Image: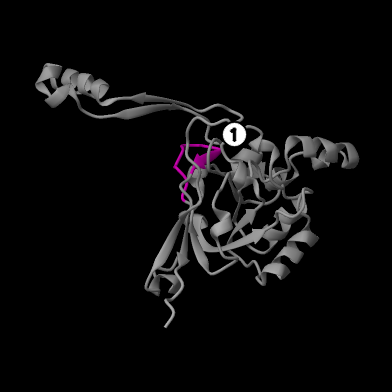
Amino acid sequence: MTSMLPPLFMQPEVRLVDLSVPLGESEAESVPVVVEYLPHCCGGAHLAQLADIEQQQLEGGLAWASERIQAITHNSTHIDAPHHYAPLCQGRKSRTIDEIPLDWFWGQGKCLDISDDSEPLSREALLAAEQRAGIRIEAQDIVLFRTGAEAFHGAAGFNRRGRGLTGDVVRELTDRGVRLFGTDAWSIDASYPKMKERSLALGPQAVWEAHFVGREREFCAIEKLTNLATLPAAGFWVAAFPIKVQSGSAGWSRVVAFVAKPAPLG
């Protein structure tokens, strides 16, 4: 990966856009997150024990605060690794999140608004969305799909919101050299009610079809993004480095877009 800064960073000012939702207790999480907040007085007791002193010898009896979290790696904004989709990819062991090269998680961003249809995005609809936005997705772009689900983050029923991708769209992206793409929805696939409806009409190949492309193509996917409505279609960069969970199927990520501020008039 080149060490030269992208032209964006030569701009006078760059706006940072937080594309991540908090990791915490939320009605939107199908698998609950439990956060135990350990206050400064608990830290004081622990420090006093470790230092072999009386807690009252510390100012106010206080020391550090900390948290104990019970969650899965697919809570909050996270990045799926190939290992999440299947044990094998192209006949080889699927890579885990700690095995993916860092340059997969940094690159030029493209953002497509696909929120005008509840049906999973087809390849033809992807091409039409590119045309409307006046962009072309290219190799190593980080592609972000705005489905409208971000408006429902934190609310019950969030996992039924947004628009999934068809397997053909994932194949199209990977054929073009895209290694990382993401969505503001709960999943890159359709919601389970929509999935069930499609499976009755099309057969079992409609179940988890976007994820299951990972059996034949290697890619990573970001889920539960937010603030995509504030992004341009192109001309920005994305940093999406995941937590390095050993042998993990995913890792939480603080995804950030770097967008050039418009030059002042006059």
Give, as a single range, the part of the protein colored magenta. Answer: 241-252
Q: Quick one: SS at disc 1?
A: loop
Q: Tell me residue 34's x, y (percent).
A: 47, 25
Q: Residue at x 18, y 21 (%)?
A: 50
Q: Would you place residue 90 above or below residue 172 in this image?
A: above
Of 130 and 98, which appears nearest the observer? 130
Residue corresponding to mark 1: 28
Query: In the rendered image of this protein, does residue 259 appear above or below residue 22?
Result: below
Picture coordinates of residue 113 (x, y %)?
Answer: 67, 58
Q: Residues within 10 Å of mark 1 (few under 14, many from 20)?
A: some
Q: Residue furthest bottom?
A: 266
Q: Residue furthest right?
A: 201
Residue 115 drawn at (x, y percent): 70, 53
Residue 150 to residue 140: above or below: above
User: Which image quarter is the C terminus in?
Assistant: bottom left
Indicate the position of residue 26 as horizontal and vertical percent values. Answer: 53, 31
The one of 132 and 169 positioned closer to us in this rendering: 132
Residue extending furthest toward the front:
266
Count every numbered label the image shows and give the total: 1
Residue 233 located left or right of residue 119: left
* 195 shown above or below 222: above
Classified by dominant secondary structure, the portion drawn in magenta counts as: loop
What's under tag 1, amino acid-wise?
Answer: Ala
- Dividing the picture into quadrants, the one containing residue 265 is bottom left
Tell me what residue is drawn at x 78 percent, y 35 percent: 193
